[in-house]
Amino acid sequence: MRKIQRLDLPSRTKNALSRRQADADRKLAAHTLDVETAWKSARQTRPLKTALGVLQAMAGNRQRCMYCGDSHGADIEHFWPKRRYPTRMFIWPNLLLCCTECGRFKGEDFPMKNGSPLLVDPTADDPWEFLDFDPATGNIVARFDLTANDWTSKGINTVKVLHLDRREALAAGYQQTHRRLKSLVEAALLRPPPAAMPLLTSLREADDHGLLGWCFHGSGQNMAPFSTLRANHPDVWVRCTQSVF
Protein backbone atom coordinates (compact mmCIF):
# COMPACT_ATOMS: atom_id res chain seq x y z
CA MET A 1 0.00 0.00 0.00
CA ARG A 2 1.32 3.41 -0.90
CA LYS A 3 0.48 6.96 0.15
CA ILE A 4 -1.71 8.45 -2.58
CA GLN A 5 -1.73 12.14 -3.38
CA ARG A 6 -5.29 13.28 -3.99
CA LEU A 7 -5.64 15.40 -7.09
CA ASP A 8 -8.22 18.12 -7.63
CA LEU A 9 -11.26 17.55 -9.77
CA PRO A 10 -12.16 19.91 -12.62
CA SER A 11 -14.46 22.59 -11.25
CA ARG A 12 -17.35 21.47 -13.47
CA THR A 13 -17.06 17.91 -12.16
CA LYS A 14 -16.77 19.10 -8.57
CA ASN A 15 -19.92 21.20 -8.94
CA ALA A 16 -21.81 18.30 -10.52
CA LEU A 17 -20.91 16.02 -7.61
CA SER A 18 -22.01 18.70 -5.16
CA ARG A 19 -25.40 18.90 -6.86
CA ARG A 20 -25.72 15.11 -6.76
CA GLN A 21 -24.93 15.10 -3.05
CA ALA A 22 -27.39 17.90 -2.34
CA ASP A 23 -30.13 15.97 -4.15
CA ALA A 24 -29.25 12.80 -2.20
CA ASP A 25 -29.35 14.74 1.06
CA ARG A 26 -32.81 16.12 0.26
CA LYS A 27 -34.12 12.65 -0.54
CA LEU A 28 -32.54 11.25 2.60
CA ALA A 29 -34.32 13.86 4.69
CA ALA A 30 -37.57 12.99 2.95
CA HIS A 31 -36.94 9.24 3.45
CA THR A 32 -37.09 8.65 -0.32
CA LEU A 33 -33.41 7.97 -1.03
CA ASP A 34 -32.55 4.68 -2.67
CA VAL A 35 -28.76 4.65 -2.34
CA GLU A 36 -28.05 1.97 -4.94
CA THR A 37 -30.36 3.52 -7.53
CA ALA A 38 -28.90 6.98 -6.98
CA TRP A 39 -25.34 5.70 -7.33
CA LYS A 40 -25.98 3.50 -10.38
CA SER A 41 -27.72 6.38 -12.12
CA ALA A 42 -24.89 8.80 -11.39
CA ARG A 43 -22.17 6.28 -12.20
CA GLN A 44 -23.05 6.38 -15.91
CA THR A 45 -22.73 10.17 -16.15
CA ARG A 46 -19.77 12.16 -17.42
CA PRO A 47 -18.88 13.69 -14.01
CA LEU A 48 -18.46 10.26 -12.39
CA LYS A 49 -16.52 8.99 -15.38
CA THR A 50 -14.26 12.04 -15.06
CA ALA A 51 -13.84 11.34 -11.35
CA LEU A 52 -12.89 7.75 -12.17
CA GLY A 53 -10.28 9.03 -14.61
CA VAL A 54 -8.74 11.27 -11.95
CA LEU A 55 -8.65 8.36 -9.48
CA GLN A 56 -6.91 6.25 -12.11
CA ALA A 57 -4.34 9.00 -12.61
CA MET A 58 -3.81 9.16 -8.85
CA ALA A 59 -3.20 5.40 -8.77
CA GLY A 60 -0.35 5.61 -11.29
CA ASN A 61 0.32 4.22 -14.73
CA ARG A 62 -0.75 0.70 -13.80
CA GLN A 63 -3.91 1.90 -12.03
CA ARG A 64 -3.42 -0.39 -9.05
CA CYS A 65 -5.98 -0.79 -6.27
CA MET A 66 -5.38 1.85 -3.61
CA TYR A 67 -5.83 -0.69 -0.81
CA CYS A 68 -3.76 -3.71 -1.80
CA GLY A 69 -1.54 -2.04 -4.42
CA ASP A 70 -1.50 -5.32 -6.34
CA SER A 71 -4.62 -5.88 -8.44
CA HIS A 72 -5.98 -3.55 -11.08
CA GLY A 73 -8.30 -0.90 -9.67
CA ALA A 74 -11.63 -1.88 -11.17
CA ASP A 75 -14.02 0.84 -10.02
CA ILE A 76 -14.84 3.63 -7.62
CA GLU A 77 -14.91 2.67 -3.95
CA HIS A 78 -16.48 4.60 -1.07
CA PHE A 79 -14.09 4.72 1.89
CA TRP A 80 -17.05 5.53 4.17
CA PRO A 81 -19.57 2.96 2.81
CA LYS A 82 -22.33 4.72 0.89
CA ARG A 83 -25.19 2.66 2.34
CA ARG A 84 -24.25 3.50 5.91
CA TYR A 85 -23.06 7.04 5.16
CA PRO A 86 -25.10 8.33 2.21
CA THR A 87 -24.20 11.93 3.08
CA ARG A 88 -20.68 11.11 1.79
CA MET A 89 -21.78 9.31 -1.37
CA PHE A 90 -20.61 12.02 -3.81
CA ILE A 91 -17.95 13.66 -1.64
CA TRP A 92 -14.65 13.63 -3.53
CA PRO A 93 -12.34 12.83 -0.56
CA ASN A 94 -14.47 9.74 0.11
CA LEU A 95 -13.87 8.20 -3.32
CA LEU A 96 -11.02 5.74 -3.95
CA LEU A 97 -10.00 3.27 -6.65
CA CYS A 98 -10.43 -0.33 -5.56
CA CYS A 99 -10.02 -3.83 -7.00
CA THR A 100 -12.88 -6.31 -7.00
CA GLU A 101 -11.34 -8.47 -4.27
CA CYS A 102 -10.66 -5.64 -1.80
CA GLY A 103 -14.13 -4.24 -2.49
CA ARG A 104 -15.68 -7.62 -1.74
CA PHE A 105 -13.73 -8.03 1.50
CA LYS A 106 -14.46 -4.50 2.72
CA GLY A 107 -18.10 -4.25 1.70
CA GLU A 108 -19.94 -2.48 4.51
CA ASP A 109 -17.28 -3.39 7.08
CA PHE A 110 -16.08 -0.09 8.53
CA PRO A 111 -14.77 -0.26 12.11
CA MET A 112 -14.86 2.98 14.07
CA LYS A 113 -13.65 4.28 17.41
CA ASN A 114 -14.84 7.56 18.94
CA GLY A 115 -16.20 8.64 15.57
CA SER A 116 -12.95 8.01 13.67
CA PRO A 117 -12.34 5.24 11.12
CA LEU A 118 -10.04 2.39 12.09
CA LEU A 119 -9.11 1.73 8.48
CA VAL A 120 -6.20 3.23 6.60
CA ASP A 121 -7.25 5.78 3.99
CA PRO A 122 -4.27 5.85 1.60
CA THR A 123 -5.17 9.35 0.41
CA ALA A 124 -5.22 10.75 3.95
CA ASP A 125 -2.83 8.49 5.92
CA ASP A 126 0.73 7.31 5.50
CA PRO A 127 -0.04 3.57 5.43
CA TRP A 128 3.34 2.62 6.89
CA GLU A 129 2.57 4.47 10.10
CA PHE A 130 0.04 1.73 10.78
CA LEU A 131 1.14 -1.20 8.64
CA ASP A 132 4.28 -3.31 8.37
CA PHE A 133 5.65 -5.75 5.82
CA ASP A 134 6.96 -9.21 6.65
CA PRO A 135 9.57 -10.14 4.00
CA ALA A 136 9.57 -13.79 5.13
CA THR A 137 5.88 -14.32 4.35
CA GLY A 138 5.11 -11.38 2.05
CA ASN A 139 2.17 -10.48 4.29
CA ILE A 140 1.08 -7.00 5.27
CA VAL A 141 0.60 -6.91 9.04
CA ALA A 142 -0.15 -4.34 11.73
CA ARG A 143 2.76 -2.18 12.82
CA PHE A 144 3.93 -2.35 16.43
CA ASP A 145 3.92 1.06 18.08
CA LEU A 146 6.85 1.22 20.50
CA THR A 147 5.48 4.35 22.17
CA ALA A 148 2.14 2.74 22.93
CA ASN A 149 3.74 -0.71 23.41
CA ASP A 150 0.97 -2.21 21.31
CA TRP A 151 -0.05 -2.97 17.74
CA THR A 152 -1.70 -0.03 15.97
CA SER A 153 -5.49 -0.33 16.03
CA LYS A 154 -5.82 1.09 12.54
CA GLY A 155 -3.27 -1.43 11.30
CA ILE A 156 -4.99 -4.37 12.99
CA ASN A 157 -8.37 -3.49 11.53
CA THR A 158 -7.08 -2.69 8.04
CA VAL A 159 -5.32 -6.06 7.84
CA LYS A 160 -8.38 -7.87 9.19
CA VAL A 161 -10.97 -6.19 6.95
CA LEU A 162 -8.93 -6.50 3.73
CA HIS A 163 -7.44 -9.93 4.57
CA LEU A 164 -3.97 -8.54 3.86
CA ASP A 165 -2.29 -11.38 5.74
CA ARG A 166 -4.31 -14.18 4.09
CA ARG A 167 -3.91 -13.64 0.34
CA GLU A 168 -1.20 -15.83 -1.17
CA ALA A 169 -1.08 -14.14 -4.56
CA LEU A 170 -0.87 -10.73 -2.90
CA ALA A 171 1.97 -11.88 -0.64
CA ALA A 172 3.88 -13.32 -3.59
CA GLY A 173 3.63 -10.00 -5.43
CA TYR A 174 4.94 -8.05 -2.44
CA GLN A 175 7.84 -10.46 -2.02
CA GLN A 176 8.77 -10.13 -5.68
CA THR A 177 8.79 -6.35 -5.44
CA HIS A 178 10.85 -6.49 -2.25
CA ARG A 179 13.46 -8.69 -3.95
CA ARG A 180 13.71 -6.26 -6.87
CA LEU A 181 14.19 -3.27 -4.56
CA LYS A 182 16.83 -5.09 -2.53
CA SER A 183 18.72 -6.09 -5.66
CA LEU A 184 18.80 -2.52 -6.94
CA VAL A 185 20.19 -1.17 -3.66
CA GLU A 186 22.71 -4.02 -3.39
CA ALA A 187 23.91 -3.29 -6.93
CA ALA A 188 24.22 0.42 -6.15
CA LEU A 189 26.29 -0.33 -3.06
CA LEU A 190 28.80 -2.20 -5.23
CA ARG A 191 29.49 0.98 -7.21
CA PRO A 192 30.36 3.54 -4.54
CA PRO A 193 29.46 6.22 -4.21
CA PRO A 194 25.89 5.55 -5.43
CA ALA A 195 24.09 8.43 -7.10
CA ALA A 196 20.81 9.30 -5.41
CA MET A 197 18.66 10.31 -8.38
CA PRO A 198 19.46 7.38 -10.70
CA LEU A 199 18.90 5.03 -7.77
CA LEU A 200 15.57 6.65 -6.94
CA THR A 201 14.46 6.44 -10.56
CA SER A 202 15.21 2.74 -10.77
CA LEU A 203 13.59 2.06 -7.39
CA ARG A 204 10.39 3.86 -8.37
CA GLU A 205 10.17 1.93 -11.62
CA ALA A 206 10.52 -1.36 -9.71
CA ASP A 207 8.12 -0.51 -6.87
CA ASP A 208 4.85 -2.11 -7.93
CA HIS A 209 3.40 -2.27 -4.41
CA GLY A 210 4.32 0.95 -2.63
CA LEU A 211 7.08 -0.68 -0.60
CA LEU A 212 9.49 2.24 -0.86
CA GLY A 213 7.64 3.95 1.98
CA TRP A 214 8.31 0.89 4.12
CA CYS A 215 11.95 0.67 2.99
CA PHE A 216 12.82 4.29 3.75
CA HIS A 217 10.33 5.33 6.44
CA GLY A 218 9.06 2.08 7.94
CA SER A 219 10.85 -0.81 9.60
CA GLY A 220 12.51 -1.74 6.31
CA GLN A 221 15.08 0.98 6.90
CA ASN A 222 16.53 -1.17 9.69
CA MET A 223 17.10 -4.17 7.39
CA ALA A 224 19.91 -4.76 4.91
CA PRO A 225 20.63 -3.49 2.35
CA PHE A 226 18.69 -0.33 3.23
CA SER A 227 20.34 -0.05 6.65
CA THR A 228 23.73 -0.36 4.90
CA LEU A 229 22.83 2.44 2.50
CA ARG A 230 21.80 4.64 5.43
CA ALA A 231 24.98 3.90 7.41
CA ASN A 232 27.50 4.13 4.57
CA HIS A 233 25.97 6.85 2.42
CA PRO A 234 23.94 9.18 4.68
CA ASP A 235 23.74 11.91 2.04
CA VAL A 236 22.18 9.51 -0.47
CA TRP A 237 19.88 8.18 2.22
CA VAL A 238 18.62 11.66 3.07
CA ARG A 239 17.92 12.41 -0.59
CA CYS A 240 15.97 9.18 -0.88
CA THR A 241 13.93 9.66 2.28
CA GLN A 242 13.04 13.21 1.25
CA SER A 243 11.78 12.02 -2.12
CA VAL A 244 9.90 8.89 -1.04
CA PHE A 245 6.46 9.31 0.50
Image (spheres, grey):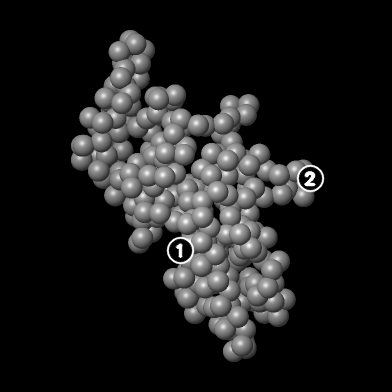
User: Which disc, if any, is residue 69?
Assistant: none
Residue under the image location 44 percent in, 71 percent down: 205
- Name the residue furthest bottom: 191
Q: Where does residue 143 sit, x and y in percent of width and height? A: 67, 50
How many residues crowd mark 2 within 10 Å: few (<14), some (14–19), many (20+)? Answer: few
Q: CA distance from mark 2 to mark 1?
A: 31 Å
The residue under label 2 is: 149
On screen, residue 14 above or below 30: below
- Name the residue furthest top: 30
Q: Where does residue 118 sit, x and y in percent of width and height? A: 59, 36
Q: Where does residue 17 sit, x and y in percent of width and height? A: 30, 33
Tags 2 and 1 touching, CB below 8 Å? no
User: Which disc, if any, is residue 208?
Assistant: 1
Kind of residue at badge 2: Asn
Is 65 left, or right, of 11 in this rendering? right
Q: How many marks?
A: 2
The quadrant in which the C terminus is found is: bottom right
Residue under the image location 47 percent in, 74 percent down: 201
> Which secondary structure, mark 2?
loop
Is 114 left, or right, of 74 in this rendering? right
Sequence order check, earlier mark of 2 and 1: 2
On screen, residue 48 above or below 26: below
* Residue 28 in view in this figure: yes
On screen, residue 244 above or below 5: below
Residue under the image location 58 percent in, 44 percent down: 159
Kind of residue at badge 1: Asp
